[in-house]
Amino acid sequence: MDHQTRGLRLMGQAGTCRVVLLMVIVVAIVLGLQYFELTPIFIVSPGNGTVSKVRDSNNITKSAENETFLASQEASTGIKPLNSTEVFKILEHKFLNDSPKASGQDRGNETASSLHSLPPKIPQSNKKHEHMSKKKRPLVVISITQMNNMIMKRHNDPNNSLAPQWGSKVDEELKTARNNIKNADLVKTDDTLYAPLYHNLSTFKRSYELLEQTLKVYVYAEGDRPIFHQPEAIMEGVYASEGWFMKQMESSSRFLTKDPTKAHLFYLAFSSRILQQKLYVRESHSRTNLVKYLRDYIDLIVSNYTFWNRTRGSDHFFTACHDWAPAETRRGPYMNCIRSLCNADVGKDFVVGKDVSLPTTKISSAQKPNGNIGGNRPSKRTILAFFAGSLHGYVRPILLNRWSSTPEPDMKIFGRIDHKSYIGYMKRSRFCVCAKGYEVNSPRVVESILYGCVPVIISDNFVPPFFEVLDWESFAVFVPEKEIPNLRKILISIPLRRYVEMQRRVLKVQQHFMWHDGEPVRYDLFHMILHSVWYSRVFQTFYPN
């Protein structure tokens, strides 16, 4: 009996062990499946090359946007989205076999002629791909026409303005300037200004004249170098607009005043790029200390002067080209300032009618800021459209996937190429594609203009520079991001006569996008930026009768 009982117990223990082992195996399988579900993947539809990041399989069911996207792509193409492994196998086979330098570095030794069939570069780092997909197409897209309506509405609505806390002589001067601009004499032609470029040549010409006759700017001496008052630290590179404007503003004999009571504008002379370089802690994912530094500066200004409080900062301005600047200054004391921003995204933090769009200018040499300006005449521009650049953001991968999967001989769409070849293509192309990267702005807009290439702007909600006076649609093409698959159709549908006139206007507008070493020149980039700030100051402020 004891032997029988002992045997039954052993059998029971063995059965329990089997059950426990089975449970462990099941748990391991479940955890394994969860691990693979949580692994980030890229969904690339062969139909239009749209790239989307899915962090969790549950997110697909929770997000109506993702559901609609996936369903529409499968329905339109008849092909299910590829997973990341399949995508990279295709891309590597198609693009990387012939490229020993496919890690995103420049191809410094390649000539323009060797680049006609140059494949785009595909980043190898998964982290880069993850970063590219974090931002998606905006849900609401605002057209240039709508932006123009927004600025007119704001400039005619007293509820959108801040009246000064107490009166000053400069208020009357600004009020007079406003009335003179609104009632400007009719001007049909001008020796320097090409009328078709402007919404209203008469008002722009009168406003610019009053800028030269009236405007006085005070620059606070406070602020430690190199973040403040050190333009020479940032005269080259993609953030150079900050340095060039600061240098020419702080040395201006025409516009500066040492008497703040006579100032119509107060300039905060800091560099958002140097701020980021000096204060941001890498991998911290926090900009709190940068924001605090800027707020502490305003506290210092308020403690030393009364001028900030008179207008609550609405007559103060700064220029900032770093991507983070809009977010760093959208709240707190800077929210009332006139912000001149390269990252001018009307769908986010940019306030149309108050803020102004700062041109992104990539300067290779401070001694020659405009580079080798010029290009072929229209009849010698044999390339329909050109783009080259890194795969930043979500738009460029779509562009490259579309035109690499079905290449067209007149569409030169590449990854990164060497600088000399890049310029050569711009000089020989009719249309230059200015596709957004991580943010809406791109130096390609100004580069296209300087090289006589009609800009094709693919960047939803981008506010183009000087749009309050320039009629951008008269010399540039705006293509919604969703229309990338139809890009070539859109461009070839533009009649030759229309293209020739647009290219002529590009050449005429060049004067507004050029820096000049030494003294600024009338209507150049410095003066146009200052005019945008002046125009905002004049029209956003209403004064009680």
Image: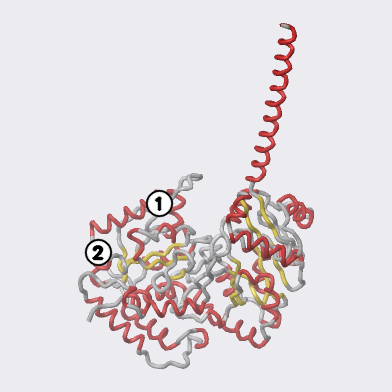
Is residue 417 visible in the rendered image? The answer is no
Across and down, in percent, residue 107 comes to 69, 57
Real-space CA distance between mark 1 and mark 2, rounded to the nearest whole angstrom: 23 Å
Amino acid marked by disc 1: Leu
Which image quarter holds the N terminus?
top right
Residue 13 placement, left or right of 452? right
Residue under the image location 73 percent in, 49 percent down: 85
Mark 1 or mark 2: whose residue is earlier in sequence: 1
Indicate whether 112 appears above or below 173: above
Q: Quadrant of residue 316?
A: bottom left
In the image shown, does 2 or 30 lie closer to the viewer? Answer: 2
Residue hosting label 1: 290
Counting from the top left corner in percent of width and height, residue 445 is at 56, 71
Residue 291 spot, x, y in % from top left: 38, 53
Q: Nearer the viewer, residue 3 or 412?
A: 3
Q: Residue at x 49, y 80 (%)?
A: 470
**In the picture shown, does residue 381 fall above or below 298?**
below
Q: Which residue is mark 2?
A: 309
Image height check: is 387 above or below 382?
A: above
Image quarter where the C terminus lies is bottom left
What's the amino acid at mark 2? Asn
- Whether residue 248 is visible to the viewer of this picture, yes or no, is yes
Tell whether 339 sits left or right of 369: left
